[in-house]
Image (tube, helix red, strand yellow):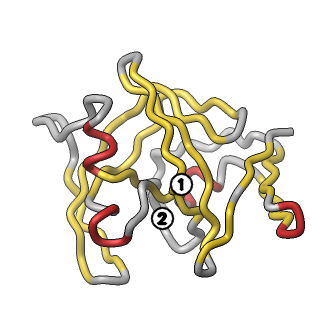
Amino acid sequence: MPEISFRLFKGLLYMPVTITNKGQKLLLNNCIFDTGSAGTTFDTEEAAKIGIKSTLESKLKRLVTVGGYQTVFTHCVDILLLGNQTLHKIEVEVGNLHSKFGIEGIIGTDLMRLFDWEIIFSQSKIRMYEFHQVSIHQTE
């Protein structure tokens, strides 16, 4: 069963995530596990390091955030690695997270609903169970 180590900081669970785009890998250590976020989002500056930029094919979305509204674009990453669980061809959102919130990414409920999760605070670990066959491109 996949496990992910996390650190608790100011009431938030920070975890590492690795994304791969066109053969380029990027490790992001400051991603929060956020049940209040519908989508998985990565910081624009970080994503640009591996060639993820807005294109004519990108869909734009306007999100409601704690600080107001934010426009993001979507991008399909080749691989997203959570712990030792590899997810292929995952659509994510890309927006300005670092300068506004000081984080590199948000793991939202679009990815969370693919697994059952157990948070073990005493060990600073999150366990992932049962891969669910749910399309993450669905809107509900």
Count of numbered marks: 2
Badge 1, how many Cα within 10 Å: few under 14, some, many 20+? many
State left or right for residue 13 relative to residue 27: right
**Callout 2: helix, strand or loop?**
loop
Tell me the residue at 78%/56% (across/down): 126
**Quadrant into which the N terminus falls:** top right
What label does residue 80 carry, if any? none
Q: Position of residue 61 (x, y in %)?
A: 24, 59
Q: Residue at x 83, y 46 (%)?
A: 129
Q: Is residue 103 above or below residue 136?
A: below
At a point 33% along the width and 53% down the height, the residue shown is 43
Mark 1 element type? helix
**Sequence-wise, which precedes: disc 2 or disc 1?**
2
Asked whether, in this view, residue 84 is left or right of residue 18, the answer is right
Q: Amino acid at mark 1?
A: Asp
Q: Inspect the image, locate mark 2, and give the three-letter code of the amino acid beneath it.
A: Ala
Compared across the picture, whether 140 is left or right of 121 comes to left
* Residue occupying image coordinates x 62% and y 54%: 15
Whether label 2 touches label 1, CB < 8 Å: yes
Residue that protrudes farthest toward the left in the picture:
56
The picture quadrant where one finds residue 97 is bottom left
Dot 2: few (<14), some (14–19), or many (≥20) neighbours within 10 Å? Answer: some
Which of the labelled discs sits on residue 38, or is there none?
2
Marks 2 and 1, Cα distance to the nearest angstrom?
Answer: 6 Å
| Residue 25, percent from left and from top | 45, 26
Camera-side residue: 77 or 45? 45
Which residue carries the number 1 mark?
110
